Image: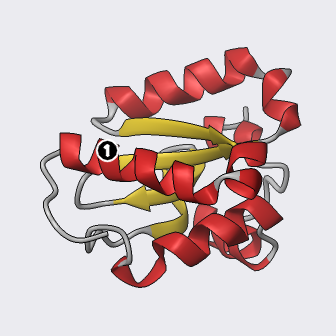
Amino acid sequence: MDTAWQRANDKGDQRPTARARQLRNNATEPERRLWQALRNRQVLGVRFNRQFPVGPYICDFVSRELRLVIEIDGATHAQSEDHDRRRTAFLESQGWRVVRFWNGDVMSNRDGVVLELVRVLKELGVAGDV
């Protein structure tokens, strides 16, 4: 019998941290672009981690302090809406807030994506400079 993590992971023999490391080392271009804006506490002083395991899932970006998950969705996510709904429901049931952006938005309007994140962070009570 396989676990939910193994079903969510295309390399069932890897531990979540090993798989997360592999994903960090092979980030997509939209993930790399957004990471350049998020790293080093550049957005309102909030610390984000990349490819962070939460339960059976590995999330693109998280703020552990705020329990905020940022997911970057590509074209394949349009065909896996049910999976994304289950994933979001699980994360929310664990007390995480999930925010999703499309690859194209990150690539063509990264500043707009960051401004939306600033809005979400302020909604969560974060004060600070962008």
How far across and how far down the image is residue 15, in percent?
65, 64
Q: Is residue 120 above or below residue 27?
A: above
Residue at the spot x=46%, y=22% of the render?
89
How is this picture coloured?
A: secondary structure
Q: Position of residue 24 (x, y in %)?
A: 69, 73
- Relative to 116, is 12 above or below? below
Q: Residue at x 44, y 36 (%)?
A: 98
Q: Give 22 or 81, whichever is nearer the viewer.
A: 81
Quarter containing the N terminus: top right
* Residue ranking furthest to the top: 82
Residue 124 visible (yes or no): yes
Q: Is residue 19 visible?
A: no
Question: Which residue is labeled 1 in the image?
Answer: 119
The image quarter containing residue 119 is: top left
* Residue 71 coordinates in the image, percent (x, y): 58, 45
Residue closer to the observer: 122 or 1? 122
Residue 130 lies in what quarter of the image?
A: bottom left
- Image quarter for residue 43? bottom left
SS for tag 1?
helix
Which residue sits furthest bottom?
40
What amino acid is found at the position of numbered circle 1 in the picture?
Arg
Seen at 87% across and 33% down, the residue is 76
Residue occupying the point 47% across, 38% down: 99
Label 1 environment density (alpha carbons within 10 Å; few <14, some 14–19, many ≥20): few
Left or right of 33? Residue 130 is left
